[in-house]
C-alpha cells in the first residue's frame, strides 16, 4: 500500500537516502537542493513546507505541496503537486511531477501515488491535471496513461532542443 505524506519538518524513514539517490534529478524531474548538497535537510524541509502556502514564494512559482511516497513505512519517492498552473507550467512541468528511487521501481508506487495526488488536486477544484514527460520516458508515460492521461501534444522543450510530451487528465 502506498501513502502520500505531506512534507513537514520531520523527515520520514529513508528520506535522506532517497533524496541523495535523486541528486540532480532524472528524466525531467528536478533534483533537490539537499540532494545536491546545497543546503541542510532541515532547511530543505522548511522550504518544502513554506512552498505549500502562498507566502514568500520566489517569483514565478506557484504554491506546491511536496509529498513523500511511502511504501512499507519507507520513503520510496517524492511527488510535487502545483496547486494551479501559471504560463510557464502550462508549457512544461504541469501540475504534478514524481520520482521513485530506482530500487523501488516496477511495483506500482508511482501509479498509486499519482492517483492519490489527482484526488487531492480535484478536491482543490482543478477540473484537469497537466503532466509533462520526456517522450522516451516510457515508464512515466505508462503511469500517466494508467491514470487516464491522454497525450495532448508534443512541443519543443523551452529549456533545450529536445521534445516534451504534454498530457492531460480529466478530474471530473
Image (cartoon, helix red, strand yellow):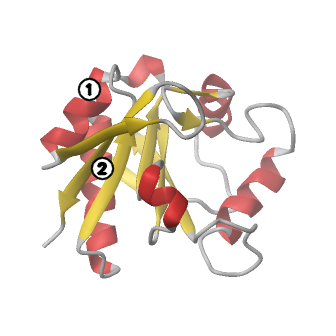
> Observer-nearest residue: 132 or 145?
132
Visible in this render: residue 164?
yes
How far apart are labels 1 and 2 at the CA level? 14 Å
User: Residue 145, image x and y in percent?
Assistant: 16, 40
User: Residue 147, image x and y in percent?
Assistant: 17, 48
From the image, tell me which residue sits under label 2.
114
- The quadrant the N terminus occupies is top left
Query: SS class of the residue under badge 1?
Result: loop
- The quadrant the C terminus occupies is bottom left
* Residue at x 53% of width, y 25% of height: 161
Query: SS class of the residue under badge 2?
Result: helix
From the image, tell me which residue sits under label 1.
107
User: Residue 58, image x and y in percent?
Assistant: 76, 67
Left or right of 79: which side holds 119?
left
**How many numbered marks appear?**
2
User: Residue 84, image x and y in percent?
Assistant: 44, 72
Q: Earlier in the sequence, mark 1 or mark 2?
A: 1
Amino acid at each position: 500500500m502506498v501513502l502520500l505524506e505531506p512534507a513537514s519538518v520531520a523527515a520520514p524513514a529513508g528520506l535522506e537516502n532517497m533524496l541523495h539517490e535523486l541528486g540532480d534529478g532524472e528524466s525531467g524531474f528536478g533534483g533537490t537542493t539537499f540532494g545536491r548538497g546545497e543546503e541542510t535537510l532541515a532547511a530543505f524541509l522548511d522550504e518544502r513546507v513554506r512552498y505549500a502556502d502562498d507566502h514568500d514564494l520566489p517569483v514565478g512559482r506557484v504554491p506546491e505541496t511536496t509529498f513523500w511516497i511511502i511504501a512499507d513505512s519507507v520513503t520510496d519517492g517524492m511527488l510535487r503537486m502545483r496547486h494551479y498552473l501559471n504560463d510557464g507550467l502550462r508549457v512544461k512541468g504541469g501540475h504534478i511531477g514524481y520520482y521513485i528511487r530506482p530500487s523501488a521501481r516496477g511495483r506500482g508506487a508511482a501509479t498509486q501515488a499519482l492517483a492519490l495526488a489527482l484526488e487531492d488536486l480535484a478536491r482543490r477544484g482543478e477540473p484537469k491535471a497537466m503532466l509533462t514527460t520526456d517522450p522516451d520516458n516510457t515508464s512515466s508515460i505508462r503511469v500517466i496513461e494508467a491514470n487516464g492521461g491522454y497525450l495532448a501534444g508534443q512541443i519543443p522543450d523551452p529549456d533545450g532542443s529536445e521534445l516534451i510530451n504534454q498530457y492531460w487528465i480529466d478530474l471530473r
